[in-house]
Amino acid sequence: MELKEYLQPHEVLIPLPLQGHITPFTHLAMKLASKGFTIIFVNTESTHNDGFPLSFDWSANASQFVEGLIHVFQAHVDDFIENLVLSKPNPPISCIIADSFHVWGSTIAKKYNLVNVSFWTEPATVLTVYYHMDLLKSNGQFVCHGMNQIS
């Protein structure tokens, strides 16, 4: 890669296709573009069309939805990145910035020899709660009365 190509970063941004994740990614994309970055924003065709039938009930099928996001979306993104890299864009793709919930972002980046950045879209306090969930549960500070405990 020539020095000129390093001076023209070309990023692929991959948010979780949910509104609360797309908005922070949009802000990041605009900020990076204003600094001279070339941005490709990967998303489903519509945030209202997540690939499931219109009759699909999220609340009743949350685990099926999450499985789709983890496996199906990953496969589509992998195919997209492969085609993108093979097309040899100018400037070349230098980095994948994936939502932290896309745990597979690093796998795809490594496969195509790209830098991987995990972008957390929620407040730092939410990350702290996730990080300390076991401690909160063991101290009895995170109890949901009337709900079955998830093992």
Image: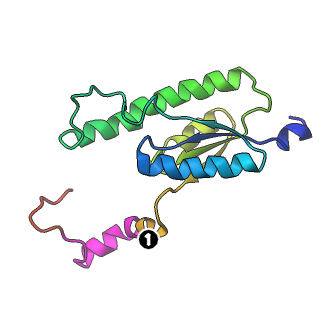
- Point 33% across, 40% down: residue: 66
Which element is circle 1 on? Answer: helix
Lateral position of residue 36 relative to residue 58, left or right = right
Q: Position of residue 53 (x, y in %)?
A: 27, 25
Q: Is residue 132 magenta?
A: yes
**The C terminus is located in which quarter?**
bottom left
- Point 21% across, 36% down: residue: 57
Q: Position of residue 19 (x, y in %)?
A: 42, 46
Q: Nearer the viewer, residue 121 or 113?
A: 121
Vertical side of 114 occupied by 125: above or below: below
- Point 25% across, 42% down: residue: 62
Q: Is residue 2 magenta?
A: no
Q: Main secondary structure of the magenta part?
A: helix
Vertical side of 28 occupied by 146: above or below: below
Q: How is the image coloured?
A: rainbow
Lateral position of residue 134 relative to residue 71, left or right = left
**Label 1 amino acid?**
Thr
Residue, far right: 3
Vertical side of 27 occupied by 112: above or below: above
Q: Residues within 10 Å of mark 1 (few under 14, many from 20)?
A: few
Residue, far left: 146
Q: Position of residue 125 (x, y in %)?
A: 44, 70
Residue stretch in magenta: 128-143
Lateral position of residue 26 relative to residue 149, left or right = right
- Point 74% across, 49% down: residue: 34
**The N terminus is located in which quarter?**
top right
Q: Position of residue 76 (x, y in %)?
A: 49, 26
Q: Nearer the viewer, residue 37 or 93?
A: 37
Lateral position of residue 141 relative to residue 22, left or right = left
Residue behind mark 1: 125
Q: Quadrant for residue 47, please give it.
A: top left
